[in-house]
Image (cartoon, rainbow, N blue to C red):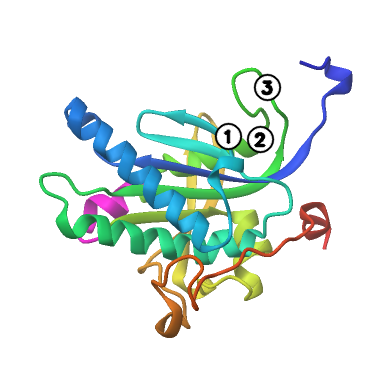
Amino acid sequence: MKENGEVQLSYRLLLAVDIQGYSRRDTREQLRAQRLLSDALDGAARGVGLDRDGWDKQVGGDGELATLPEGVDPATVAGDFVILLDEALREVNRDAGRFRLRVRLSLHHGTLTAGPFGPAGDAPIVVQRLLDAAPLRRQLADDADRDLAYVVSDSLFDDVVRTGFCALPPRGFRAVRVVAKGAVFRGHILTGRAVGEDAGEDAGEGAGGPGARTARVLDFPALALG
């Protein structure tokens, strides 16, 4: 590990995901939930031209914190990837048995640096605090038909979702304010289903098919300064 004077900050997109009700499952069901979520994330990533093998993942039993590679288009992840993940969860839950796979998802972009136990910096804290936010948890608790509860940070909403380049419209989100560990975190929760405005013709098609999405490449520092 580099000394403090040599630490290099990077500006990256972070994704955190967590399985609802994981601790209530027995060991077999926990393993099944892990596999199903991993498959759903893999499929959604492939659907936008990404490979999760290239993500820097810090995993736990009920989810993961992932730092995506440099140059990944945040609009594609914040929109198309989320739409495909919601579709994958709905498909999984058509034959869910005793437990449905219901998850919380948060996105943020910001500065971080690599550490011996995972990424360090404000960005990993923000994305985790939003993932654990009470309003996001309540969204799953209050809507039994919902499979995905999704929140983006305030800065990502302003820089990405509000631009119109994201497949999910800004009007579909509502602002939330979260107080945790003596700090305030602001984000925007998707209120409806993860369905884009032009979802009719290409929603649900697999990777490589006519409707497959493709992740674009942007310069994150340039985006932040723009």
What residue do we see at 73% from left, 47% from top? 70
Residue depicted at 77% across the width and 39% down the height: 10
Indicate the position of residue 6 as horizontal and vertical percent values. Answer: 88, 22
The magenta-colored residue range is: 137-146
Q: Mark 3 sits on what residue?
A: 115
Image coordinates for residue 103, horizontal then vertical, percent = 34, 47
Q: Mark 2 and 1 residues: CB-CB less than 8 Å, in contact?
A: yes
Image-based side of 184 in relation to 221, left or right: left
Q: Residues within 10 Å of mark 3 (few under 14, many from 20)?
A: few
Q: Can residue 22 be seen from the camera position used here?
A: no
Q: Residue furthest right?
A: 5
Q: Secondary structure at mark 1?
A: helix
**Residue under numbered circle 2:** 122
* Placement of 30 over or under 90, stated as above or below: above
Q: Are marks 3 and 1 in contact (CB under 8 Å)?
A: no
Residue that carries the numbered disc 1 in the rendered image? 125
